Image (cartoon, grey):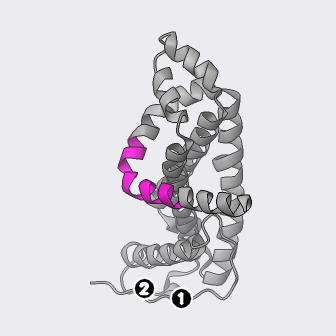
């Protein structure tokens, strides 16, 4: 049986994802993971003073692997979004009629952007939140002080996700939209089915908001 005690950070943090609640979720997940990691990884009966200063090696291989995996997942969702929104519908329909493998699937996806975007954005935000939470937990393990660690992790994660999770994949996917969209179509369809309940709710909320904004604009 394990119990977790959390101390609220005293330094304001900028959210690394687009959801307002992601900041609090990230910190909670990071502190939870850090407590669990500390209980299972450090030698029993040794406190920090007896163990000495924490080093990068204390983070653990599993944390590093998960950080890389979620960063790649973030890049995948960002690239998929850019590819599917950049591809020319007329061109992809022509490829579908010509029998190009996967083109018909892409053509069907891009017909309904309101159904396409929710699972991609949801997956991207979940991946970014996971990266931020793991990085914060790793920073707490390395630096010890939670406030300093959270501040450093926020800066590093923002930079890493901006470069490797947004700019590079979106630029590459937009330049090769047709090929990239055909490659990512099958995984995106599978993820859409997996996240369908949540995506359906998000789609309804967004459609309702658009209708309300449209009616208020018309008035």
Give the position of the N terminus as an image quadrant. Answer: bottom left
Picture quadrant of residue 138: bottom right
Picture quadrant of residue 43: bottom left
Report the Cα–Cα distance between label 2 and label 1: 8 Å
In the picture of the structure, the residue carrying the numbered disc 1 is: 49
Q: Does residue 145 appear left or right of residue 98 in this picture?
A: right
Neighbours of disc 1 within 10 Å: few (<14), some (14-19), many (20+): few
Q: Does residue 32 appear left or right of residue 27 in this picture?
A: left
Q: Is residue 198 magenta?
A: yes
Q: Does residue 200 appear left or right of residue 124 in this picture?
A: left
Residue 65, position in %: x, y?
A: 48, 53
In the picture of the structure, the residue carrying the numbered disc 2 is: 46
Residue 5, position in %: x, y?
A: 44, 89
Residue under the point 57% across and 76% down: 140
Residue 208, position in %: x, y?
A: 54, 60
In this rendering, the count of numbered labels is 2
Q: Where does the magenta region start and end?
A: 190-205
Of residues 138 and 151, which is closer to you in this image?
A: 151
Give the position of the C terminus as an image quadrant. Answer: bottom right
């Amino acid at each position: 049986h394990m119990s977790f005690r959390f101390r609220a950070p005293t330094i304001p943090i900028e959210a690394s994802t687009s959801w307002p609640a992601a900041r609090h979720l990230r910190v909670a997940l990071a502190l939870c993971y850090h407590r669990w990691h500390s209980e299972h990884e450090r030698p029993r009966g040794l406190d920090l003073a007896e163990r000495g200063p924490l080093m990068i090696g204390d983070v653990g291989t599993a944390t590093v692997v998960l950080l890389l995996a979620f960063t790649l997942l973030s890049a995948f969702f960002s690239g998929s979004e850019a590819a599917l929104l950049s591809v020319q519908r007329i061109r992809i329909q022509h490829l579908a009629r010509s029998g190009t493998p996967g083109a018909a699937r892409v053509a069907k996806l891009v017909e309904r952007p309101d159904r396409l975007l929710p699972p991609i954005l949801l997956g991207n935000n979940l991946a970014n939140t996971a990266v931020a939470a793991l990085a914060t937990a790793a920073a707490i393990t390395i630096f010890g002080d939670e406030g300093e660690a959270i501040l450093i992790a926020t800066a590093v994660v923002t930079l890493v996700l901006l470069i490797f999770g947004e700019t590079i994949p979106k630029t590459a996917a937009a330049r090769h939209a047709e090929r990239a969209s055909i490659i990512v179509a099958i995984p995106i369809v599978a993820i859409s089915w997996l996240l369908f309940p949540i995506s359906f709710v998000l789609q309804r909320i967004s459609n309702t908001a658009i209708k309300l904004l449209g009616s208020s604009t018309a008035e």
